[in-house]
Image (spheres, rainbow, N blue to C red):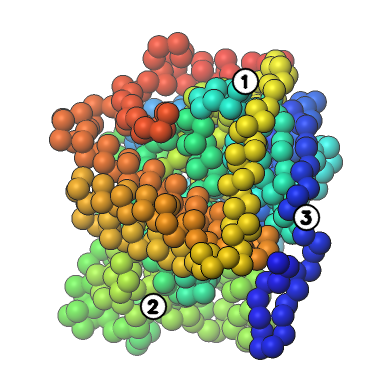
Amino acid sequence: MDFQANRGNEQIRWPYAVRYDKVNCVTTDVLVIGGGLAGCCAGIAAARRGQRVAVCDKAPIKKSGCGGAGMDHWNTVLENPDSPMSAEENVEKGRDTGMCHRDYIAEKGAWAALLELEKMGLNIRDDLDEFAGAPTRDEKSGLLKAYDYREMVAVKLHGGNFIKPVLYSALKDAGAETYERVMITSLLTENGEQGKPVAGATGFSLETGEFYVFSAKSVIITAGYACSMWIYNLEITGNSYRWDPNEIGEGLAIAWNVGAEVYGMHRAGSTKGNNPFAWPRFGIGNPSNTWFPCSIVDNNGKEVPWEDVNGKPLTDVLSRNMPAEGQPYIGSSKSDNLSGIGQANIIHDLPERIRAGEYELPLWADLAGMPEDERRSIWGVMIGNEGKSRFTLYDLYTRSGFDPDKDMLMAPIEKPENYLKFGAWFHGEPDVVKPWRTENGGQGEIACDWNLMTNVPGLFVAGASGGLEGCSFACSSGFYAGNRAAEFAHKSERRTLNRQQIDTERERVYAPVERCGSAEAYVSWKELWGGSTRVMQQCCGEYRTIPILRQGLKWLDSIKRTEAKQTYARNPHELARVLECETRITVSEIFLNACIARIEAEDAGEDGNGYIFNKLENGKVLTLHKEKMYWLKGDNEATYLENYLKCTAEERG
């Protein structure tokens, strides 16, 4: 059936010729799954190494992914000549994330990646001297410092709104093939066996429904985070969503199905972060993140004081952008005594003062009261280039008459305690609706080694799929993974695709189409999505026990055996949505199993002695324990730099 929906008595025809029976076979050397920032950089790097590259994305690559609409700043440029510390010092003195080698790789390449984007045509400097003499400007380089005005550790992207078009042009110039509106549904492996070297992938067109079979010597997953396991109403969440709502964990699910290890999935649905039912992101009065260091006043115009990370009162705006005593740089968690963590903030006892009547709600962001250069920096450079705010906020508010020289934006009205709950990042009513979600960064990722390769030979990961979220880390890890995957492909033979594996996947993909019209197919994709999120709300909420988590697994299994087999798809769009729901169920199962493994490790006294990984093997979920700092032990070199130099030796010639 080629109809999408009914509007009154009018049937809306699907605008493309639907060809479910057509199979397209694509032979490439390196296949990149996901065309966001990391995916584009990976494709560019691999193509420049002489490999044939194919990049697939569910959306038009020129504007796809979390960075599709822009990016306001570039973090952790520790390899620049004026950095206060090296990447080695930063990671060695920092918190143990359980994947520190991965963080180091991204930090090591962040500065070089920024300069590479500048060569591609991205404007990163204050070339027109709009901020000449302002504290934010580094006069030697013309770069605008972000957050920290003493040290060069983060850069405001003067032209960040154009980052994806620039990368897209470079991707095409490098000779990479692009497959847009193609949804990858599975990975193919040698002999069709789990854990064997990767051999390619399958997918289908969201326009025509045609099937795709990719043969590749190496594959890079850059498909982003897993979102929307706990919530399912995009109409309500809208612009409050933190990530690209198309990110539903497809990279995670397909890697899991072929035996890749995952790490940190027990953090599922963390209550830290952003309420999915909040105000438009960055569209309300705020002193933090993209709005840092905006002044905040109460309803009577009384300014809320600031203090540094050590609690010292700050008396002027500039001091908010200066590191505190003992702090190597703002945002650092790397000081020797860990006394200087994070940024300056509004006073720590604001909630008590609000309740005492000293400050009257609502609070307001006082851009007009800021120094002129800071006002232009926050509203013009940061809000003007941030992906969630360029078009939906900066352009819209300006057209609607908002003038930062004289107008203020109201902050959400909340319980007084909430104004400091998430580091004074005003986002709106975090306690009104329980924040069940996977929108947070760091909720788990595909594990990788020093080459950013998973335990499945030839399968690499970059960007948020590997826990490397953020513009600078996504691009840096993308370039790195692209080079490693190109080297792997150059040395590898092409593996024969397994026909049975392909046929089985094709049958699964088109099952909702085959069922369409039958009396047994009456469950829509929205109903299936809503059902699986209800399981996670109930069984993977704030209170978790092994029996509760196991009940969730039983519930999801029941849904897979019943309602999931009663879904239908009337066109490729609905088919994609149904398959996304199946992916959400797979990812939800990974979360639940990881939470069980975490509790079991705690009960056995093993938690804290190492790192817990999970993987799927022959239908069973295995829990793996790795010792502390394993990435500097065994066959690895003893230092971060030695491992990095070893892995990049061929690239450097």
Cβ atoms at labels 2 and 1 below 8 Å apart: no
Label placed on residue 412: 2
Does residue 124 lie above or below 50 as drawn? below
Name the residue beneath numbered marker 1.
Answer: 648
Query: Would residue 16 appear left or right of 488 to someone viewing this image?
Result: right
> Where in the figure is residue 567, as x and y percent of width and height?
53, 61
Numbered mark located on residue 19 in the image: 3
Q: Nearer the viewer, mark 3 or mark 2?
A: 3
Circle 3: is it few (<14), some (14-19), or many (20+) Cα within 10 Å?
Answer: some
Q: Amino acid at mark 3?
A: Arg
State the separation of the CA atoms marked 2 and 1. Answer: 48 Å
Quick one: label 1, few (<14), some, or many (20+) residues within 10 Å? some
Task: Say which mark, if any, is on residue 475.
Answer: none
Pinpoint residue 76: horizontal percent, then vertical percent: 52, 41
Q: Nearer the viewer, residue 625 or 629?
A: 625
The amino acid type, in three-letter code, at marker 2 is Pro
Residue at 77% in and 59% down: 18
Q: Secondary structure at mark 1?
A: helix
Please, what secondary structure does the residue beneath circle 3 have? loop
Coordinates of residue 198 in the picture (x, y in percent): 61, 27
Residue 279 at least partly seen: yes
Three-letter residue code for mark 1 = Thr
Residue name at image x 39 percent, y 66 percent: 275
Which quadrant, please, contains the N terminus?
bottom right
Q: Note whether 497 is above or below 168 in the view shown.
A: above
Q: Earlier in the sequence, mark 3 or mark 2?
A: 3
Up/down of 188 relative to 204, above or below: above
> Distance between the Cα atoms at labels 3 and 2?
49 Å
Circle 2 Cα neighbour tier, 10 Å, few/some/many (<14 / 14–19 / ≥20)? many
330 sits to left or right of 129: left
